Image: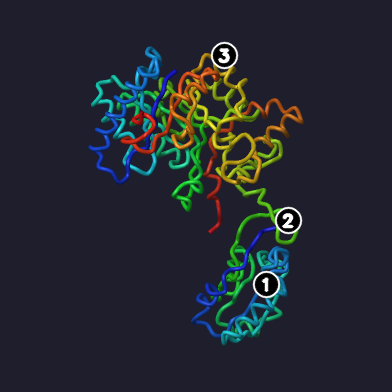
Amino acid sequence: MFLTEKKDAKEIDEALNKYKRIGIVGCASCASVCLTGGSKEVKEMEKHLVNIGKEVPFTISIDEPCDKRVLKEDIRFVEDELADTEAILVLSCGTGVQTIGEYTDKKVVTGVDSRYIAQTEHIGEYNALCGGCDECRLNFTGGVCTVTLCPKGLLNGPCEGHNGINCEVAEESKCVFMKSYENMSKFFEEENLSRIFSPRDYSRTIKRKI
Amino acid sequence: MKIIPQIETPAGENYIDFEENLSKLIEGIKYKGKKFGLNGAGAGDAIGSYSVVIEQNFGINALLLCNDLKNRHNNNLNIIYAFNMRDKNRVAILSDLITFEQLGLKNIIISEGLHPLKTVFYAAKPVYDIDVLGLSSIIKTGFPLLKDNDYVNNFSLFNLGVVVGISTPADFLKIKKLSKIGVDRFIINYFGDNLDINIINYIKAEKKPVFIFINESNVKSTLEEFIKKNLELNVDGIIIKILNEKSNIFTQD
């Protein structure tokens, strides 16, 4: 799941300041799970916009607004209202916002902050385990991602800053390299224990279609 | 047992004044060395008789200061350049190393570096483009950094020190890798207890010098008491980071 957090209403209001007729699109997938863009949040946002004097021609929750195929199908239900809308407030991650902007060619405003790919512990409690860094090293690190879980994103750790138990930065957490070491030892991964990672190849990270 | 001050380059202070005060500090260390009956610092070692660690932070360029100190002290002072992986990417680090080598300097200490969240620059984006193991490989084994380029570095002759933790099996593993690569000395980030003496013994068995690194503010006793307390660790020296070259643990009686 991709974790999002609600934005401050003031920022949303300012972004929508010069628009009167505003549609609202929610996300029935990730943003719904983290209570930022489900049908309840869409209703709350509609109420808020009406309270500050806006018109809301439509509201809709799309299963996956980041998936163009799903978006094309679902957006047809509000086709007429969309034509008469000045801006769309999107309650989904940045991918959903941009997909809707690209597809509708309307002004889009995001109502949430995009955080990270998250593991859900409980509703409201999430962990970042994967940073989507283009080159997965989990096969060599005892199955824990040091790039994501180490605040310094080190490949070859630990750093000198831990106190023997806890991380220098995330003081309540154990150093991830200790976990990595324990896992590799547990599974007798001698080759991985002695491995030294070369510096990351960042040329891989810019191969994005723009 | 050597005692070595480490200081960051100044930000708001007049550079000439700073350099003069730093020279006074170095004289103060010589005095303290004699007073404690220490060998002040171990003549004959690559780090030499009297040493100072110049740490790059947000103040003036540390390489500039290293070069000035070298010229001013006529090679009678071992100058050690300390920098971290937090502030520069591989391009900037390579430039520093080339400059350092061209200036005829040889001693460097590298660390991953305190995360910006723990500094006054809490909102800065940390770099950590490469880590100390990666950089040690580049320095000591000539691991290539440049694509389709015939540049070959001469860094293998550097005296390379690396700041490490020595509390956990993961630290031990990292130290073994660093030692295998050819790192010349180890500097232990000191937290008090929680030290695994076996790791120090391993480093000593590898015939590599070991130093303790500590911030002056964490020395909760006099310098003499702190040195005595840590004699049993059998380390080769203590690097003490001072905050003010005019008033510090070395200049106070």
Residue indicated by mark 3: B205
Q: Count residues near mark 3 (Cα–Cα under 10 Å), then give few for <14, some for 14-19, many for 20+.
A: few
Chain of the residue under the numbered disc 1 shown in the image:
A
- Asked where in the image residue A185 lies, by quadrant, the reply is top right
Q: Vertical placement of A97 versus A44: above or below? A: above
Q: What amino acid is found at the position of numbered circle 1 in the picture? A: Gly
Q: Is residue B63 left or right of residue B136?
A: left
Find residue B222 and name its label. none
Residue indicated by mark 1: A26
Residue closer to the observer: B21 or B210: B21
Q: Count residues near mark 2 (Cα–Cα under 10 Å), then give few for <14, some for 14-19, many for 20+.
A: some
Q: In this view, does B177 lie to the left or right of A185?
A: left
Disc with the residue nearer the chain's start (1 vs 2): 1
Q: Are marks 1 and 2 in contact (CB under 8 Å)?
A: no
One can see residue B46 in this view: no
- Between marks 2 and 3, how big is the CA–CA gap? 47 Å
Residue closer to the observer: B132 or B191: B191
Q: Is residue A120 left or right of residue B62?
A: right
Q: Please provide percent x and percent y for residue A115.
A: 61, 58
Q: Are marks 1 and 3 on the same chain?
A: no
Chain of the residue under the numbered disc 2 shown in the image:
A
Q: Do the residues labelled 1 and 3 touch (CB within 8 Å)?
A: no
Furthest-top residue in this view: B44
- Asked where in the image residue B8 lies, by quadrant, the reply is top left
Q: Count residues near mark 1 (Cα–Cα under 10 Å), then give few for <14, some for 14-19, many for 20+.
A: many
Q: Give the colour scheme of this rendering.
A: rainbow
Q: Are marks 2 and 3 on the same chain?
A: no
Find residue A120 and name its label. 2
Q: What amino acid is found at the position of numbered circle 2 in the picture? A: Thr
Q: Please provide percent x and percent y for residue B154.
A: 39, 23
Secondary structure beneath dot 3 equals helix
Q: Please provide percent x and percent y for residue A167.
A: 60, 41
